[in-house]
Amino acid sequence: MLAAVSPITIAALKEQAGDTPIAAAVAAQLQSRATRSTKTGKPYLELGFADATGSFALKIWSDSPNHDAASTLAAGAIVRLEAEWTQNSYGVNPNKLTWDLLDDAAIATFLAGDPATRDKQQRDFADIVALSQSITDPRLHALCQHFLTQMGERFRRSGAAKRNHHARRGGLVEHVAQMLRCAAALSPLYPELNRDLLLAGVLFHDCGKLWENAYPEDGFGQIHSLHGEMLGHIPLGIELVNKLWRDLLDSPAAAAWAGLTPSAEETRLHLLHLIASHHGQFEFGSPTLPRTPEAFTLHHLDNLDAKLEMLRDAYAQAHEIAPGIYDRVFPLPANLVRPLAKTEDRCAPRQKTEDQQGT
């Protein structure tokens, strides 16, 4: 049907699909498969697909000609999905769906990732390295460098969430980089903030997601791990920082830190507090509440970046239900309104009066 057309990304599909069907091909990897049924008992398969830019779920009904093929599609299979696509508040929907397995050359291109996403994540990681290197506290500086050296590759392919925001391979790098840039910009404006501690806290606040939202080296489907399921990213992050800290205390450089104030132990405790409190509320999973300027700042930076990412995705997917009003997209709390456009200065430069020209 669309053999001559290059596949588009999942993000592009969500942006383009609406009430009017569009014909498009999408390359995606099978992430999950579950057997479900409607309230009336009609069975269907729910297939989760992902690429470098995001994910979606497709319902394959039991009476669909694709049902048998969907039942036997191998886990992790990389396919080209062709259909006439629409989208509503429940997600994207295919009509006349067909799929084919990609050949080796197409798989290699797919696993390399969307070029625009890959380039952005490379720039973001470079910013993370640069801002981490700008930390002047020798203990926090060494801790950040140790983490990036030991865990950098795993970090670069982790997601920031299972859904809702930055839920894609490399999404954690995008999230942390933006938060670091914000933290670096805010620190000079609020002298009560410890810049070194805040930057380190941003880098490590979600480091447990290297297990909770891990991705394989050769795919775009999140891996479920016992550590991630049974502990969650906050306890895992605390455990990781303690382990890395112990490594540093055993290093030759640690001898030079003995006379520093605040002490290494106090510095470690404040950093752990940022990890523990960054969700901001007990009911959102924080074992403690923010108690320092850096903890409050980190919590709100985290929430701000997550919410604005959700808004970007929502505007790309939402349907306009009235002029300038869009339907609600989960998990945002209400219908969206079209943002106010930025003012464009279309006026030509004002001409000087004769009196002004004579001065």
Image (cartoon, helix red, strand yellow):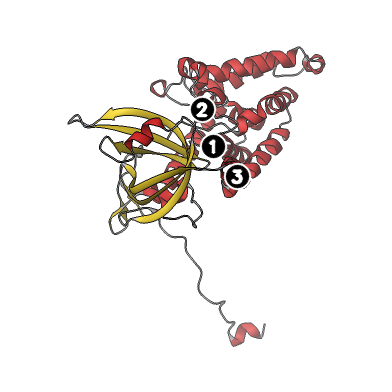
Residue at x-position 60% and y-position 48%: 115
Residue 359 shows up from this direction: yes
Category of crowding for the residue at label 1, using alpha-carbon neighbours closer than 10 angstroms: few (below 14), some (14–19), many (at least 20) = many
The amino acid pointed to by label 2 is Asn
Foreground residue among 131 and 218: 218
Circles 3 and 2: CB distance less than 8 Å?
Answer: no
Residue at x-position 69% and y-position 13%: 246
Residue carrying label 3: 105
Q: CA distance from mark 3 to mark 2?
A: 28 Å
Q: Which element is circle 3 on? A: helix
The x, y position of residue 135, in whole percent, is 71, 32
Residue carrying label 1: 171
**Relative to residue 53, is residue 146 drawn left or right?**
right
The x, y position of residue 271, in whole percent, is 61, 21
Which one is in front in this view, the residue at disc 3 or the one at disc 2? 3
The amino acid pointed to by label 3 is Ala
Q: Which element is circle 2 on? A: loop
Circles 2 and 1: CB distance less than 8 Å?
Answer: yes
Instruction: Tell me the number on the disc at residue 331.
Output: none
Category of crowding for the residue at label 2, using alpha-carbon neighbours closer than 10 angstroms: few (below 14), some (14–19), many (at least 20) = many
Q: Which element is circle 1 on? A: helix
Q: Earlier in the sequence, mark 2 or mark 1?
A: 1
Up-down relation of residue 290 to residue 355 (above or below): above
The x, y position of residue 234, in whole percent, is 51, 20
Tell me the quadrant of the picture where the C terminus can be found: bottom right
Residue 193 shows up from this direction: no
Residue carrying label 2: 213
